Image: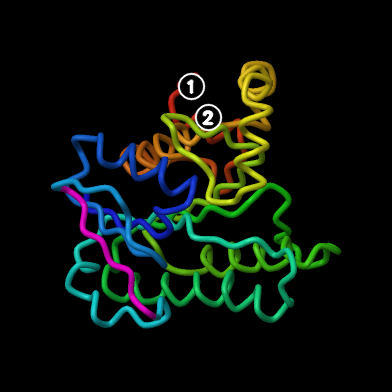
Amino acid sequence: MKIALFGASGMIGHGVLRECLKDPSVSKVISVGRRSLVEQHPKLIQHAPPDLFDLRDLANDLTGLDACFFCLGVSAAGMSDARYRHITHDLTVSVASTLLRLNPGMSFVYVSGAGSDSTGQGRAMWARVKGATENALLRMPFKAAFMFRPNLIIPLDGIKSRTRSYRLFYKVAGPLLKLTYGHWPSSTTTTENMGLAMLNLMRHGGSDIILHGQEINRAAGGIAC
């Protein structure tokens, strides 16, 4: 498989990248994001374009894809509705449209979030925007599209969040989180399971289009942390 991965510098994307590079069925990973990665690997090609809305210079590397794993995202905290929608909805749809034009038979996995609102009627702005993004992607003629709505994600393998407050939270709550994963897998998953689930869905497909924690863990094969 040849996979485009957006957002590999973030906590979730880093976990997904790790599983892609380990997987013998993945021949190439095209990483696209706002910043370059420390990782070096024979399978890995990196791009950090100045404008993620304009991928024309990357067309050669973004052709022949089997799938895109879209893990790029920002917090809505302190951001206007219009700005958050531009970065979250407009950018995702722009990237998806470009990739679909170059790869009509590809699949797409979008990391959304628990509480995303597909109805557009909820009170939380971020949830409406995420839900609208999901709806737009599901209307596109991909071979398959899956929306991941994880709640609590446990970082494994030394992976850390780029957000300071999250790093502190994980440092303090680490042992409790692993206990939570064992007792409440419906609301908790891991960075490893996020990557494994995406890869397994590309190989075998799946009946769930919107996946919460339990469905993500099931798609990953029930791998424990």
* Magenta stretch in the rendered image: 43-50
Alpha carbon distance from label 1 to label 2: 5 Å
Mark 2 lies on a secondary structure that is: helix
> Magenta segment: does it hold 45?
yes
Mark 1 lies on a secondary structure that is: loop
Q: Residue furthest right?
A: 123
Q: Amino acid at mark 1?
A: Gly
Q: Is residue 39 above or below residue 172?
A: below
Q: Amino acid at mark 2?
A: Asn
Q: Is residue 148 left or right of residue 14?
A: right
Indicate the quadrant where residue 34 lies: bottom left
Residue 217, disc: 2
> Magenta segment: does it hold 181?
no
Indicate the quadrant where residue 181 lies: top right
Q: Is residue 26 above or below residue 129?
A: above
Residue 141, disc: none
Whole-percent x, y for residue 89 in the image = 58, 72
Q: How many residues crowd mark 1 within 10 Å: few (<14), some (14–19), many (20+)?
A: some
Q: Is residue 120 above or below residue 114?
A: below
Mark count: 2
Tag 1 residue? 222
